[in-house]
Image (cartoon, grey):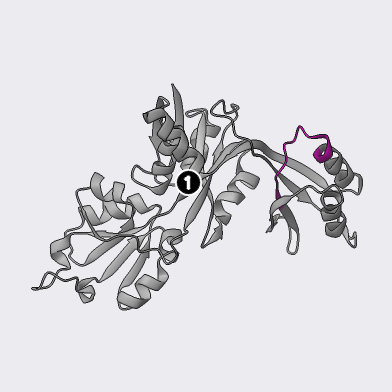
């Protein structure tokens, strides 16, 4: 049985992992901090870690990407998409008025993960601009905190699963500002993923440009462009070595086994760039995982 490290039970990571692995026999190890999720696999306590890496609304989860680049050496083995559906959670009797309607003025504080909170800013500003906000390590942790508090007027933003796990009510469903709110997850670890195959392979690389080389980034992009290799993402992040020094994180809609991509990387290296491959992995859409689930249930 494989062991998988991830953020707490009831988090979006938890829901996403269970859809990804579906009927596979998995031992889930839950951690409050993303650093502990990574280190569980680094220290061989788990075979894989589930890492949220990008969101429709917030874009890149920079902290998690920096961990992949600077702190650990764990290849990306798979990626998939999962909807981030956040809800306002607490005790219903604390917020209903005498007419059975929600009285938002009774909400004094909202607790959640900073990414989840930012996905719901319009909702918060419209209905609870007076409320204090507090950030914690995960949405599941925020729901647990609300469960254990004796103080009234404190609510969480999190998943329905977390509400059910902690015996709390879903006060308002789907409070995210945009309905097409999805999070992309990486499965990282040293063992190759042996699950369902997909027609779409991706490769992630880091490119560090040579110093004092005018037009180096243009040449890097040209190496892909003239070969008609499609890039799905490019992002600059500081190398943390000195001010103004950056690496470029690039995602490519090609398998590393393709000769064209291998030649593009050789061309980039020939101009003095350093290239580090973070992984070549299958990419799954949410619809693909739902279809797989449907087939397994029939």
Q: Considering only vertical position in the picture, is 6 above or below 176? A: above
Query: Looking at the image, which is closer to me, 100 or 146?
Result: 100
Residue at horizontal 27 percent and vertical 54 percent from the top:
145
Q: Considering only vertical position in the picture, is 23 above or below 110? A: above
Residue at horizontal 48 percent and vertical 54 percent from the top:
182
Confirm whether residue 74 shows in the render.
no
Query: Looking at the image, which is closer to me, 155 or 169?
Result: 169
> How crowded is the residue under tag 1: few (<14 C-alpha within 10 Å), some, or many (20+)?
many
Query: Looking at the image, which is closer to me, 85 or 6?
Result: 85
* Quadrant location of the C terminus in the rendered image: top left
Query: Looking at the image, which is closer to me, 200 or 84?
Result: 200
In magenta, the rendered stretch is 249-261
Confirm whether residue 215 shows in the render.
yes
Image x and y of residue 117, in percent? 40, 63
Residue lying at the far left of the rendered structure? 98
| Tag 1 secondary structure | helix
Q: Considering only vertical position in the picture, is 86 above or below 187? A: below
Residue at horizontal 60 percent and vertical 34 percent from the top:
198
Image x and y of residue 205, in percent? 72, 44
Q: Considering only vertical position in the picture, is 148 above or below 7? A: below
170 left or right of 293 in image: left
Question: Magenta stretch containing residue 36, yes or no?
Answer: no
Question: Magenta stretch containing residue 257, yes or no?
Answer: yes
Residue, disc 1: 34
70 left or right of 1 in image: right
Q: Quadrant of residue 248?
A: bottom right
Image x and y of residue 222, in percent? 86, 54
Residue lying at the far front of the rendered structure? 298
Residue at horizontal 87 percent and vertical 51 percent from the top:
226
Image x and y of residue 193, in percent? 57, 28
* Quadrant location of the N terminus in the rendered image: top left
């Amino acid at each position: 049985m494989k062991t998988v490290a991830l953020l707490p039970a009831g988090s979006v990571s938890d829901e996403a992992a269970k859809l990804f692995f579906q009927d596979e026999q998995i031992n889930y190890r839950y951690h409050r901090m993303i650093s502990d999720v990574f280190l569980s696999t680094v220290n061989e306590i788990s075979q894989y870690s589930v890492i949220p890496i990008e969101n429709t609304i917030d874009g890149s989860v920079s902290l998690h990407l920096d961990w992949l680049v600077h702190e650990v050496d764990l290849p990306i083995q798979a990626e998939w998409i999962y909807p981030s559906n956040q809800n306002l959670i607490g005790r219903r009797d604390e917020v209903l008025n005498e007419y059975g309607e929600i009285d938002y003025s009774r909400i004094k504080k909202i607790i959640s993960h900073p990414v989840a909170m930012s996905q719901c800013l319009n909702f918060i500003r419209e209905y609870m601009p007076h409320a204090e906000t507090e950030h914690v390590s995960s949405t599941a942790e925020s729901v647990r905190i609300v469960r254990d508090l004796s103080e009234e007027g404190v609510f969480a933003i999190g998943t329905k699963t977390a509400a059910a796990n902690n015996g709390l009510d879903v006060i308002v469903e789907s409070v995210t500002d945009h309905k097409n709110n999805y999070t992309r997850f990486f499965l990282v670890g040293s063992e190759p993923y042996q699950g369902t195959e997909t027609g779409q392979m991706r490769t992630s690389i880091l490119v560090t440009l040579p110093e004092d080389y005018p037009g180096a980034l243009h040449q890097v992009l040209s190496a892909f462009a003239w070969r008609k290799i499609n890039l799905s993402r490019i992002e600059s992040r500081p190398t943390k070595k000195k001010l103004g020094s950056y690496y470029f994180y690039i995602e490519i809609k090609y398998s590393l086994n393709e000769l064209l991509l291998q030649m593009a990387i050789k061309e980039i290296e020939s101009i003095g760039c350093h290239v580090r491959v973070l992984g070549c992995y299958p990419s799954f859409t949410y619809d693909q995982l739902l279809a797989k689930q449907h087939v397994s249930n029939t």
